[in-house]
Image: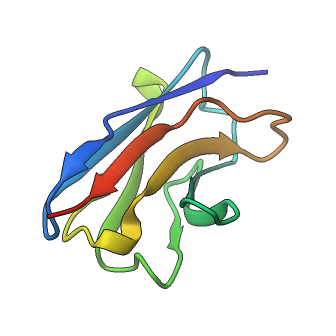
């Protein structure tokens, strides 16, 4: 399987922005569906955004209009641009794809004053 490594998380103030990256160990061109997920403290992992191989996107209602998922197949990387961050966005963010059997370490996003 293609292995994924998330990066780009950090501590930001409410209203701030971050861009998360998901670097793949191999080609992602043939992977139909990739997505971002997050897990907040004490909660289950939830779906955040998805993108097809053709660039069609979808978002959870809680992040719609604030987050943008994209993919650069030439760089084997998926991104999550996050703007107008809220305290409730605090979580560990993971990327993955349909058919994957494991999760990576994720990247921590903390939104706090």
As drawn, 55 above or below 57: above
**Residue drawn at 59 percent across, 30 percent down:** 105
62 left or right of 31?
Answer: left
84 left or right of 25?
Answer: left
Quadrant where the N terminus sits is top right
47 left or right of 72?
Answer: right
Nearer the observer, 98 or 44? 44
Nearer the observer, 56 or 109? 109
List the single residue furthest toward the top. 25
**Residue drawn at 85 percent across, 41 percent down:** 99
Please say whether residue 95 is visible from this viewpoint: yes
Residue 112 x, y percent position in the rendering: 22, 62
List the single residue furthest toward the bottom. 61
Quadrant where the C terminus sits is bottom left
Residue 51 x, y percent position in the rendering: 55, 56
As drawn, 27 above or below 104: above
Residue 78 x, y percent position in the rendering: 45, 39
Please say whether residue 80 is visible from this viewpoint: no
**Residue drawn at 49 percent across, 85 percent down:** 61
């Amino acid at each position: 399987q293609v292995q994924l490594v998330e990066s780009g998380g950090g501590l930001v103030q409410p209203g701030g922005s971050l861009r998360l990256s998901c670097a793949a160990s191999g080609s992602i061109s043939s992977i139909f569906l990739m997505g971002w997920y997050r897990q907040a403290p004490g909660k289950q992992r939830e779906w955040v955004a998805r993108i097809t191989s053709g660039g069609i996107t979808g978002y959870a209602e809680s992040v719609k209009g604030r987050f943008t998922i994209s993919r650069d197949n030439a760089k084997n990387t998926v991104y999550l641009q996050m703007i107008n961050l809220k305290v409730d966005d605090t979580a560990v963010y993971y990327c993955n794809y349909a058919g994957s059997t494991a999760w990576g370490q994720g990247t921590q996003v903390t939104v706090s004053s």
